[in-house]
Amino acid sequence: MTTTPPATPPTTPSTTTPSTTAPADPDVRRGRLRGAVDGIRTAELTTSQKLMVFVLSMSLFGLSNIILEIIPDPSIGPVDVSVSYMVFVPLTIAALFSPFWAALGAPLGEIVFTDLLMGDFSGLAEVEGYLQMFLAVYIAGSLIRNPRSRVQIAVGAIVVVLIDKILSAVVDLSKVWIGVEDAELVQGLPQSMLALEAIGLGVDVLMSGVLLGAIPAMWLIPSLHGRIEPLMGMRPRVPGEPIPGSAPRTPLFLAAALVLSVVSFGFAFLEAFDLSAGSWEPDFLDRFGNWFVLVSVAAIALVLVVAILLFRLSRSAATTDDR
């Protein structure tokens, strides 16, 4: 006997409930925010913001070097335990804002506000220190992908000193090896340039990289992250997103860094051959005393005031145009 299947009841059109899930934002891709976040602040820096980061880095690093000028350098036996620079100053600006513009301004601040205004300007030979410090801050700032990671901050602080001082050591060793300068040996230490440079590098890493680099930066950068950026119309950096103005990890950048290093060596040898044009060394500190540093402090304050005024005018003009 054949059984017929039961008749299927007629289907009535059903009303489907619309999905409450909002479509994926095309500007959000795996946590990486692209474009405007709140209609005002963006991940990319405007021209006025880049200029402000540049001036801020130049002024604060110059001020930190002025402070070091009036602090006597202690010594332990034949070893000078001195601080070359306060690493945490440019590293903080590079980690929070832009590594490129922070690196571009920091060494210029040392040249203008410390060397030039203090009367210890070596002319074209200053380009050596500028290029080496630029590479050091630029690369170290680009290594800090997460401004709240204390490990990355500590690594960045030590990398600044290693890049700058290793390049300087290569220059010093090359001068002695070629014969344009005599070795500056220290009584009581191994009579070897390589040993002396290694001891000096260790002291610089400890004093500049750790004591005045990693330790204050590990506290300062996470504390300022998310608080200082809105004052400049920027949004805080988000871990995992591209860093504005970071060093590209490409063979081309590596080649460019090597070329800049070789160029810095060339400017260093100009001084060794007494071809440093534009040198100016009246040494105002010895002539007028330590109070002369107030001239550099006043110049820094003036530059900062002018930069802030221009920045505010630029933001006001941009707001007016948006309206």
Image: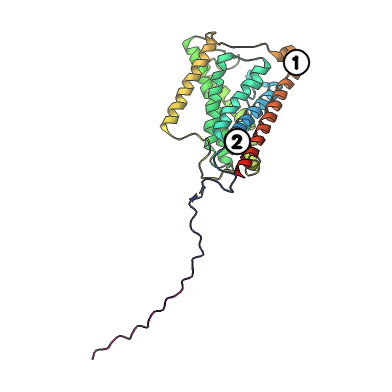
Q: Which residues are magenta?
A: 1-17
Q: Amino acid at mark 1?
A: Gly
Q: Magenta-highlighted stretch: main secondary structure?
A: loop
Q: Residues within 10 Å of mark 1 (few under 14, many from 20)?
A: few
Find residue 239 and report its horizontal and vertical position in percent. Answer: 54, 45
Q: Amino acid at mark 2?
A: Gln
Q: Is residue 53 magenta?
A: no
First in sequence: mark 2 vs mark 1: 2
Locate the C terminus and report the quarter of the image it occupies.
Answer: top right
Find residue 123 and report its horizontal and vertical position in percent. Answer: 58, 14
Q: Is residue 93 above or below residue 4?
A: above
Image point 64% across, 17% down: which residue?
116
Residue tagged 1: 289
Q: Residues within 10 Å of mark 2 (few under 14, many from 20)?
A: many
> Which circle, 2 or 1, is nearer the viewer?
2
Q: Is residue 304 above or below residue 40?
A: above
Find residue 47 and report its horizontal and vertical position in percent. Answer: 57, 34
Q: Quadrant of residue 7?
A: bottom left
Residue tagged 2: 49
Q: CA distance from mark 2 to mark 1?
A: 37 Å
Image point 54% across, 27% down: which residue?
134
Tag 2 and tag 1, C-beta contact below 8 Å: no
Q: Nearer the viewer, residue 287 or 150?
A: 287
Q: Nearer the viewer, residue 50 or 209?
A: 50
Q: Is residue 9 magenta?
A: yes
Image point 48% across, 52% down: which residue?
26
SS at mark 1 in the image: loop
Q: Nearer the viewer, residue 225 or 180?
A: 225
